[in-house]
Amino acid sequence: MSSDNIWTRRNFIQLAAAAGLLPAVTAAEDEQMMTRSIPSSGEQLPVIGLGTWQVFDVDSTPEEIDLRRQIVDLLLDRGGSLIDTSPMYNRSEKVIGGVLAESGNRQRLFLATKVWTDGKASGERQMRQSAELMKTDVIDLMQVHNRRDLDTQFGTIREWQQDKRIRYNGVTDYRESAHDEMEDVMKRYKPEFIQINYSLGEHGADDRVLPLAQDLGIAVLVNRPYMSGQLFRAAGKRELPDWARSFADSWGQFFLKFIVSHPAVTVAIPATSRLRHMTDNLAAGFGEMPDAATRERMISFIDAV
């Protein structure tokens, strides 16, 4: 990562102050965002990325594109890079393309999308359309969405990798009930990435999926980090416990740091279209992280609320 992407705490506070976001940034440290390596290549990825489900499914008006450009600019300014999307997210890929056309920041981003259809011809058509909509010649990560027509689509992805139209391959599922099937996929197909649900409210991946990813050298993207807002609703108006204040300044940071402190997790991808929330999410990539004992305490605390 170039030195141009490394901001000091003072830089971040100045930006946050200008945007009226100061309460959310106090966890940011005078350092680079924590990164994890992609096991298949050693390439480093910052641990906080951006999901786009629902929040980028908007009309491509100048106002809507500009707001998403500000979100993406904030991601990049804090050292992040990964944006995850899907054709299943309706207009999301087109909006990302509009943002890139306006900002010219394609080379600084790691674009992850998915293929979600049946048949080789349909899969190829969908992947071509994804690249066209996002205005890119190369997609960094192409994932088979929810394992749909896995043999066919994964084979095509590998062909496109040989042609250098795709850099990495992956497989996704958002359901904890699918973890057994994901284990089988990991063993049979050896994908370079998996994307799964994992959070303080859904941590079944601790049992076998995350250890297996470490054993097989598979990068892990984490979706549903807040369980579609359920974790915030569970926390309610409670204050953060005193023992958590050394590493988190908000519930969002508390939830995200549980995820990215797991050594098998590569990137968490919370979705937002609000600058204040994006600022808070990004702060979770900095500073002290909970150790194993603290992570167990976090689970017990949330289980009890």
Image (cartoon, rainbow, N blue to C red):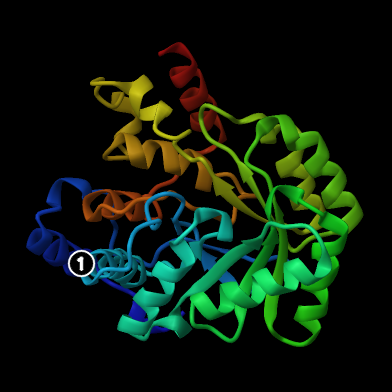
Q: Nearer the viewer, residue 244 or 91?
A: 91
According to the picture, the residue beneath numbered tag 1 turns out to be: 63
Residue 177: x, y in percent?
71, 29
Q: Report the front residue among 305 and 224.
A: 224
Residue 8 or residue 238, whichever sits in front:
238
Pointer 1 local density, CA inside 10 Å: few below 14, some 14–19, many at least 20: few
In percent of the image, x 51 and y 48: which residue is there? 260
Res 208 → quadrant: top right
Residue placed at 37% from the left, 49% from the top? 284
Residue 294 vertical position relative to residue 143 in the rendered view, above or below: above
> In the drawing, does residue 25 fall left or right of residue 49?
left
**The disc labelled 1 sits on which kind of residue?**
Glu
Quarter of the image for residue 192 reads bottom right
Q: Is residue 105 above or below residue 48?
A: below
Would you say residue 76 is visible in this rendering? yes
Image position of 53 with respect to 152: above or below:
above
Residue 190 horizontal/vertical position (percent): 84, 59
Question: In what quadrant of the picture does the C terminus appear?
Answer: top left
Query: Residue sitting at 21 percent across and 65 percent down?
Result: 12
- Camera sees residue 42: no
Q: Residue 65 location in percent, x, y? A: 29, 69
Front one among 31 and 130? 130
Helix, strand, or loop for circle 1?
Answer: helix
Q: Position of residue 125 (x, y in %)?
A: 69, 73
State the residue at coordinates (57%, 66%): 112
